[in-house]
Image: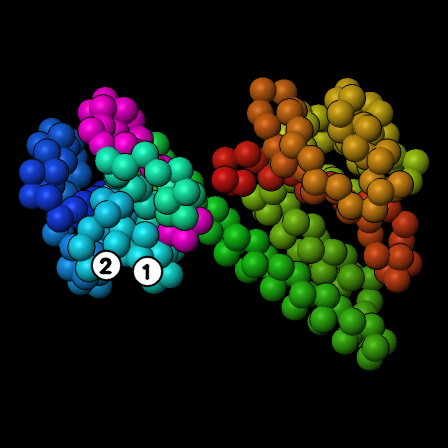
Amino acid sequence: MGGMEEAISILCVDDEPNVLSALRRLFMDEDYTILTAPSGREGIGILEKEHVQIVISDYRMPGMSGVEFLTEVYRRWPNTVRIVLSGYADTASIVEAINEGHIYKFIPKPWNDAELKVTISNSIERYFLFKRNLELTGELRTKNDELEKLNSELARLLEEKVLNLSFRDMILKAHGNIVDSLPVGILGIDRSGLIAVCNATCSGILGQIPDIIGTNIQQVGNAQLQDLAARVFEEGQITQDLKVGEERYRVLASLIDPKSGQEGATLTFIHECHCR
C-alpha cells in the first residue's frame, strides 16, 4: 500500500474461536500482523501493549459487549479504525453501535471474503489519511505560532520606534516565506476582486503565472471560485467544496476583521484528502 510508514496490525475480537480462525486464514497471505482476543477485556489488554491500527469486533459477546468494547477503544485509542461484525440484523442496535463506538463499517455475518478484504484495505487508507491530516494540523499550528512570534516582535519594535526600512523588509520576507510554505492555498482579495495575496501553494492550485498578484479574480477562469469570491462579501463566511482543474478542494472563505484597518477576504484551499 503506497505511503505506508509502519507495519499494520489488526486486532480481531470474538468469543467464537472458529470466527477468529476464519479471520486469521483470510489474511494469512497479507502483510498484516493479526492479533486475536476472545473477549473485550482481553482485547483492551492487547491494545495496552500493542500498536494496532484496525480493530474488528463481534457485536454481541458475553461480559463486555462489542459496543462497550469499541466505545472504550474510541475513548482511549481514537486513531484506530473500528469495524463491527454481527449476525443480527437489528437496525436500532446498528445505529447504537455506530454512534457509541464511532464505527467505520458494520459488516454482517457471514461476511463476503472479498468485500471484507476491500473494507480492510480502505480502512488502512483511512487510517493513514487521518494520520496525515493530524500531521498537517500540527504543521499549520507550528507555522501559526511562528507567525504570531513574528507579529509580536514586529509590534514591539514599532513601539520602540527602531524599525528601519531594511529590517521591515526582512520581517516581511520572512512572513511571506512562512505563508508560502503552508500546505494549504491562501488567496487574499479586496471587495473589487483584486488579488492581493497568493501563496505558492495557491498559485500551484490555480495554475497561474507568478504575477497573479494585482490581477482580478475574474481572470482566474473558474466560475465557481468567482461566485464564491463575490458571495463572501455578502454572507461573511462560507465553506464550499470546489473543483479546480482535476482536483477537489474544500474552500474556507471569510472576511478580514475590519479592526485590522483593511477590507477584504481570504480564501483557504484544503485538498479533499486532508478533509476526511
Residue depicted at 78% across the width and 21% down the height: 223
Tell me what residue is drawn at x 56 percent, y 44 percent. Answer: 183
Identify the image quadrant of residue 265.
top right
Q: Magenta segment range?
A: 99-121
x then y, percent, for residue 237? 78, 46
Residue in the foreground of this view, choosing between 48 and 40: 40
Depth check: 206 or 118 in front? 118
Q: Earlier in the sequence, mark 2 or mark 1?
A: 2
Q: Please give left or right for residue 196 compared with residue 127 in the image.
A: right
Q: Which residue is found at the position 31% from the left and 57% from the top?
A: 68
Instruction: Name the foreground residue: 111 vs 1.
Output: 111
Q: Is residue 130 left or right of residue 84?
A: right
Viewer can see residue 256? yes
Q: Is residue 120 shown above or below 223?
A: below
Label 2 – label 1 distance at C-alpha: 10 Å
Query: Element under label 2?
Result: loop
Residue ID at (46%, 51%): 134
The residue carrying mark 2 is: 64
Q: Which residue is mark 1?
A: 72
Q: Are marks 2 and 1 in contact (CB under 8 Å)?
A: yes
Residue 271, image x, y percentages:
57, 35
